[in-house]
Image (tube, rainbow, N blue to C red):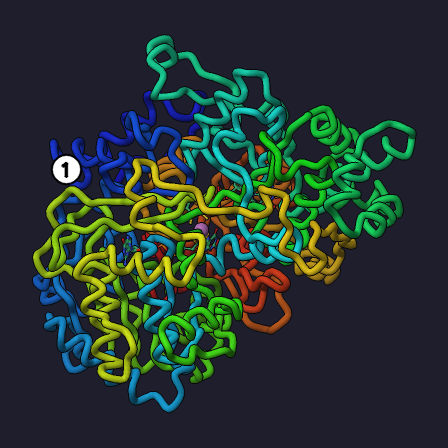
Amino acid sequence: MDEQKIEFYKGPAGGWGALKSVGRALQRQDIAIKGAKTLLSANQPDGFDCPGCAWPDRNHASTFEFCENGAKAVAAEATARRAGPELFARYSVAELAEQSDFWLEDQGRLTHPMVYDAATDHYLPIEWDAAFALIARHLNALPDPNQAVFYTSGRASNEAAFLYQLFVREYGTNNFPDCSNMCHEPSGSGMRPQIGVGKGTVSLEDFEHADAIFIFGQNPGTNHPRMLGELREAHKRGAKIVSFNPLRERGLERFQDPQSKMEMATMGSTPISTHYFQLQVGGDFAALKGMMKHLVEREDAGEQVLDHAFIAEHTSGIEALLADLRAESWEALVAESGLSEQQIRQAAEVYRQAERAIVCWGMGITQHQHSVATIQLIVDLLLLRGNIGRPGAGPCPVRGHSNVQGDRTMGIWEKPPAALLDQLEKIFGFKPPREHGWDVVQTIAAMRDGKGKVFFALGGNFASATPDTFETWKALRRCELTVHVTTKLNRSHLIHGREALILPCLGRTEIDMQAEGPQGVTVEDSMGMVHISKGINPPASEHLLSEPAIVARLAHATLGVRSRIDWLGAIENYDRVRELIEKVFVDFHDFNRRVAVPGGFRLRNTASERVWTTDTGRANFYAHRLPTDTPVHRARAKGLDTIVFKLGTTRSHDQYNTTIYGMDDRYRGVFGQRRVVFIHPDDIRSLGMRDGDWVDLQTVWDDGQERRAERFKLVPYDIPRGCLAAYYPETNPLVPLEAVALTAGTPTSKSIPVILVPHLAAAPAPSMPLFEGATA
Ligand SMILES: Nc1nc2c(c(=O)[nH]1)N[C@H]1C(S)=C(S)[C@@H](COP(=O)(O)OP(=O)(O)OC[C@H]3O[C@@H](n4cnc5c(=O)[nH]c(N)nc54)[C@H](O)[C@@H]3O)O[C@H]1N2
Ligand SMILES: Nc1nc2c(c(=O)[nH]1)N[C@H]1C(S)=C(S)[C@@H](COP(=O)(O)OP(=O)(O)OC[C@H]3O[C@@H](n4cnc5c(=O)[nH]c(N)nc54)[C@H](O)[C@@H]3O)O[C@H]1N2
Ligand SMILES: [Mo]
């Protein structure tokens, strides 16, 4: 294992550090020349879509855009390592479960479909047809299709996602929990009633015109490295970049562009943020209200701040918002945001002085109890000055998984709009279920309570990504059947139902050969651009099937002659799947032709045209009272004799969600380890503890259940007092299942009320190794 150390990182984000790190990643995966060639095909017009993140490509039709974490994601998939039947013959499931998450994925690509054998506690190879027959038998035996659930992770292509929702709805349920439920769900829930679309309205060109870019709760240096290129350019032409983040994140401070020969040769770098506001975890709500209050005060003092013409022509509800802002007290806004009145006014002045403004946000905004309201305040702020639907302005929720936005567009949604169901009925002639299905949290509760019996996952790592880990594990273990379509071995395959299958699939980087030749799939990025993705590597094993093929063959096996759809015909050539997509969704007209153009096409976004498909036919302002009833407020009101902290769980630089690439978090100065908790030095002293002490984190909750994550090292950090940060997924056992964003159901992974207690070396080890290093 690498040396464990904590060392302040002095360099800029990007630069040579990023190049070195890619070299190591390729070496780890035993990739030589092939890897380099694979990297050069990422985000090329005739290559595959990078499986890293959903940030759009600027030069989709020209040069390769270097991105460290994109390269790591590609290397992880194109690895030369294999996890074949020998691995499963050598280790029982109980033995595999003893291994860390890092070790599991590090075994490499899965090569054969596997079935769980309870008699020996081993996974054994199974033929594809037998696997599909097994699933079909379970599905057809359920008295009610709503006892089955179909999870999706956001890497699935449009084609796979479309066929999947079609199959599941023809089968008879809307139980579509997906990773979006844990991610940007509140963005859609907030914006849809407000501006008529659940997506951002900006495109990359808008970044060239914005005078100010606000970034709330995002760490692009790690999670969207290519976004730094846009921010760097914006900074260079004098745009103001304003970050709101409790932690000082390196990538939001300085960036050395590996694409710039000049910066690389001279060790130069470009500053990113012109303003950095280190607010309290969850303080954005109050900060946003404060910014708007400042604008209204200036307006009331006789200045022309608001865009009255826009407000009059395009919006509804301004009076209630203004009244609410006028009544709000600065004292409360300061207390809740953790920023001074002057800081809030300063941020608001940057906004006021900008002719055109963009607001970006990520998980720091979406994973709280009041996320939906916070997002509506962001949109209010934009609407006050007409910053939607003109160049250089608009909301920009920055999505995570590379096709998470496309999956939702294709109908992966537990709350499908009636219009989609009508359309499916009209075109395919079956009666889709009308009742809404379960989201992620509802699915876990339903399986735990015995109401969900068959769990099928198209990608992802449900057992590790979800909240309240042990409740989730109980839930999965109560299932009659669990099935995972996957590229690599992960925890979810070991926390299985009475019967279980692992179905290995092709990755994005691989050639997808079907009856009529090699196929491409399509994806939609965070800004609504749809383009084709074609693999270039030979498949990791000859036994792999593509995701569309798995879905189609399963549908054929399950529905048989009952079905109105020619499943096997559809996958002979994915053009046929796209023809079905275009029949259902008008925005995909001429799909095959338009996606054949290098770079693809942009989906229509009505809000960006100032067409408001809302209940009022206008953009709606929403007024929201400052909340004082969050779990953290309640926990603090208990009067415990120790500090109740607000814990935000976050990603390290060496991970992709639950996939751990390595043990370093370079920009935060953490090396060789992950069980750390970032804390203000004065809080360490107040607790009577010292740097480097080992602590357990314990959730303060009302249901009498103990939620504890053990053995974390205290790391003094530039973070506000009363706040903590630690990595996900190690901290997921701390998130109570019922702690969700109001109306969106998203687990509140960024604001968990916790206390710290000294870790007793003698404490019994957890019964199962909890993620990497837990038992070290
Ligand atoms: N390399 C890599 N790329 C990824 C991923 C990955 O794991 N690795 N994951 C992908 C996915 S699915 C997603 S959703 C995105 C996630 O990308 P991000 O949205 O950047 O996600 P996080 O790392 O969880 O946290 C973001 C930031 O929120 C800050 N924060 C925490 N609490 C608060 C708060 O209350 N207010 C504010 N203003 N900030 C807060 C944290 O300090 C952190 O800087 O990235 C995608 N891209
Ligand atoms: N505490 C806490 N919890 C969180 C979050 C947080 O910030 N804090 N973030 C949440 C967010 S934003 C998200 S999006 C979720 C992520 O939840 P998921 O999407 O479920 O998790 P991932 O870790 O992205 O899934 C990784 C697995 O996907 C499989 N995989 C990779 N490529 C492919 C492919 O091409 N096809 C298929 N079929 N499988 C593939 C691999 O087996 C890999 O093990 O986690 C959420 N959970
Ligand atoms: Mo995500």
Q: Residue at x 34, y 88 (%)?
A: 142
SS at mark 1?
loop
Residue 597 point in image, percent of width and height: 30, 38
Question: Can the viewer see residue 337?
Answer: no
Closer-to-camera residue (549/717)? 549
Position of 261 compared to 646: left or right? Answer: left
Closer-to-camera residue (68/334)? 68
* Position above or below: 425 against 591: below
* Position above or below: 426 against 578: below
- Say few, some or many: other residues with alpha carbon within 10 Å of mark 1 (under 14 / 14 to 19 / 20 or more): some
Question: Can the viewer see residue 159?
Answer: yes
**Which three-letter amino acid code belongs to the residue tagged 1?**
Ile
Residue 573 point in image, percent of width and height: 19, 57
Number of on-image labels: 1
Location of the N terminus by quadrant is: top left
Q: Quadrant of residue 263?
A: top left
Q: Quadrant of residue 156?
A: bottom left
Read off the residue under disc 1.
31
Residue 221 point in image, percent of width and height: 44, 32
